[in-house]
Image (cartoon, grey):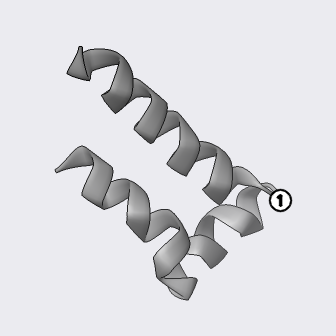
Amino acid sequence: MHTGLAGMYLADPRFTATYEAAAPGLAQYVHDAILANAARHAG
């Protein structure tokens, strides 16, 4: 479920815009961090 949410950071322009307004590149960073965390816990 968490990795599915990660996709929203880049797939939905409204979602992306919210994070990009806070800091350029933040949407990609959070997306990548969620995927890395999920991979770390997958085993």
Q: Position of residue 40 (x, y in %)?
A: 36, 17
Q: Is residue 2 left or right of residue 32?
A: left
Q: Position of residue 35 (x, y in %)?
A: 43, 39
Q: Check the image and report above or below for 16 versus 33.
A: below
Residue type of the residue flagged with mark 1: Pro
Q: Position of residue 8 (x, y in %)?
A: 41, 69
Q: Is residue 18 left or right of residue 36?
A: right
Q: Check the image and report above or below for 11 versus 36.
A: below
Location of residue 28 (image quadrant): bottom right
Mark 1 Cα shell of 10 Å, populated few (<14), some (14-19), many (≥20) = few
Residue at the spot 78% in from the left edge and 55% down from the top edge: 25
Q: Is residue 11 left or right of residue 6?
A: right
Return the residue found at the far right: 24
Q: Check the image and report above or below for 34 versus 18.
A: above
Q: Secondary structure at mark 1?
A: loop
Residue at the spot 25% in from the left edge and 46% down from the top edge: 2
Residue at the spot 73% in from the left edge and 58% down from the top edge: 22
Q: How many labels sit on residues? A: 1
According to the picture, the residue beneath numbered tag 1 turns out to be: 24
Location of residue 19 (image quadrant): bottom right
Return the residue found at the far left: 1
Choose between 43 and 13: the one closer to the eye. Answer: 43
Q: Position of residue 27 (x, y in %)?
A: 63, 58
